[in-house]
Image (tube, rainbow, N blue to C red):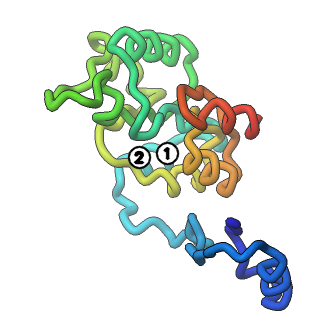
């Protein structure tokens, strides 16, 4: 049994629910997400600085596909061109998982079309390192999230009230994507 916000239920209700379950082991794992997000610890983060210069609800916290999904170079370039042509504002987090072959030891930077980052500089931020995802989602300017629909991303997005543009790829992601739409 899993309950994410059991602390909000009266203790006697929790005890009653648990007493009706078959005699199986149960573990209390606590909240998956913080119940309160403290103000950003690093206000100088480049993502947050960029967000603060944009119009309200104008940002699609665009691309973050988790750690087990990856794209080929061709797919990355096609996605980049589509985002550029959309003229929408976005933050795109490109990490090692996006490099195509997650099983290779080869370290390589994800290649975007030539001159891409310079061309989209006014409407987009491409981040090649860690980004404060929860802080971005709770920022008043963030209007949506393009996601692979991994369980954690879905729960975080739903909890933070950020709509999901679903792009499920494998495993539980298609089912999660269907359920959040």
Kindly indicate whether the residue at mark 1 contacts the one at mark 2 (C-beta within 8 angstroms). yes
Quadrant (top left, top right, bottom left, bottom right) of the N terminus: bottom right
Left-right relation of 71 to 29 = left
Depth check: give the residue in front, 44 or 73.
73
Q: Is residue 75 above or below residue 96?
A: above
Residue situated in front as seen by the camera: 94 or 25: 25
- Residue 29 picture quarter: bottom right
Quarter holding residue 144: top right
Q: Which residue is mark 2?
A: 47
**For the residue carrying disc 1, how many other residues have a C-alpha within 10 Å: few (<14), some (14-19), or many (20+)?**
many
User: Is residue 60 visible from the viewing direction of this image?
Assistant: no
Q: CA distance from mark 2 to mark 1?
A: 6 Å
Q: Can residue 5 be seen in the rendering of this structure?
A: yes
Residue 18 vs 150, above or below: the answer is below
Q: In the structure shown, which secondary structural element does the residue marked by tag 2 occupy?
A: helix
Q: At 34% from the left edge and 58% from the top edge, which residue is drawn?
A: 44
Direction from residue 76 to residue 22 in the image, left or right = right
| Quadrant that contains the C terminus | top right
Rendered residue at 39%/40% (across/down): 67
Q: Which residue is mark 1?
A: 51
Q: Residue furthest bottom?
A: 12
Element type at marker 1? Answer: helix
Image position of 89 with respect to 116: above or below? below
Image x and y of residue 23, in percent:
71, 76
- Residue at horizontal 63%, vertical 46%? 154
Residue 139: x and y, percent? Answer: 58, 53
Q: Residue at x 33, y 22 (%)?
A: 117
């Amino acid at each position: 049994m899993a309950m994410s916000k059991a602390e909000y239920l009266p203790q006697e209700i929790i005890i009653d629910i648990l007493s009706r379950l078959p005699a199986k082991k149960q573990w209390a794992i606590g909240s998956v997400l913080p119940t309160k997000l403290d103000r950003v610890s690093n206000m100088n983060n480049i993502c947050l600085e960029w967000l603060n210069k944009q119009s309200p609800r104008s940002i699609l916290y665009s691309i973050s596909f988790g750690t087990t999904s990856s794209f080929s170079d061709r797919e990355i370039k096609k996605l980049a061109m589509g985002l550029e042509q959309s003229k929408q504002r976005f933050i795109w987090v490109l990490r090692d998982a996006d490099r195509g072959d997650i099983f290779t030891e080869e370290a390589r930077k994800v290649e975007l079309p030539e001159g891409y980052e310079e061309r989209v500089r006014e409407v987009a931020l491409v981040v090649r390192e860690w980004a404060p995802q929860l802080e971005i989602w709770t920022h008043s300017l963030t209007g949506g999230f393009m996601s692979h629909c991994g369980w954690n991303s879905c729960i975080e997005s739903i909890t933070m009230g950020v709509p999901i543009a679903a792009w499920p790829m494998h495993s539980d992601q298609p089912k999660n994507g269907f359920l959040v739409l």
